[in-house]
Amino acid sequence: MSRDKNVEFLTKLHALLAEYGASIAWSCSPYSDTHGIYDEAMTIEVGNKEIARTESGCGWLDACQLKCIIGG
């Protein structure tokens, strides 16, 4: 993707996150430590409420993952 497209994408993503007070985060099990990471997942939160989470072991969030989460 060109720099202009990157800026366009990030600008739109920023606007959506700001509009909904949302965030996208990486998380893992509280039992993870320097010996291993367990149950890694990506989460989407609006305010302080988690509204979506990838399956355990999935440390990325793309259009396909999002479609599965919303039931598509």
Image: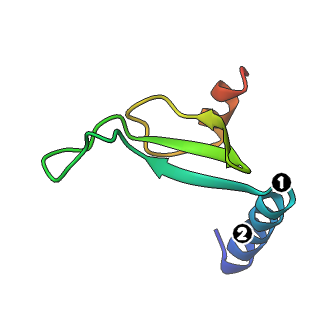
The residue beneath circle 2 is: 10
Q: Earlier in the sequence, mark 1 or mark 2?
A: 2
Above-or-below relation of 71 to 25: above
Q: Which three-letter amino acid code belongs to the residue tagged 2? A: Leu
The residue beneath circle 1 is: 20
SS assignment at label 2: helix
In the image, what residue occupies the spot 64% across and 68% down?
1
**Colour setting:** rainbow
- Can you say which quadrant of the picture contains the C terminus? top right
**Whole-percent x, y for residue 5 in the image:** 73, 71
Pick the residue in front: 40 or 5.
40
Question: Based on the displayed image, in which of its 4 quarters is residue 67 positioned?
Answer: top right
**Whole-percent x, y for residue 31 in the image:** 26, 39
Whether residue 30 sits left or right of residue 59 in the image: it is left
SS assignment at label 1: helix
In the image, what residue occupies the spot 68% across and 48% down?
48
Pick the residue in front: 68 or 36.
36
Q: Nearer the viewer, mark 1 or mark 2?
A: 1
In the image, what residue occupies the spot 33% across and 41% down?
30
Q: Which three-letter amino acid code belongs to the residue tagged 1? A: Tyr
- Mark 2 is surrounded, within 10 Å at the Cα level, by few (under 14), some (14 to 19) or many (20 or more) other residues, namely few
Q: Which mark is residue 12?
A: none
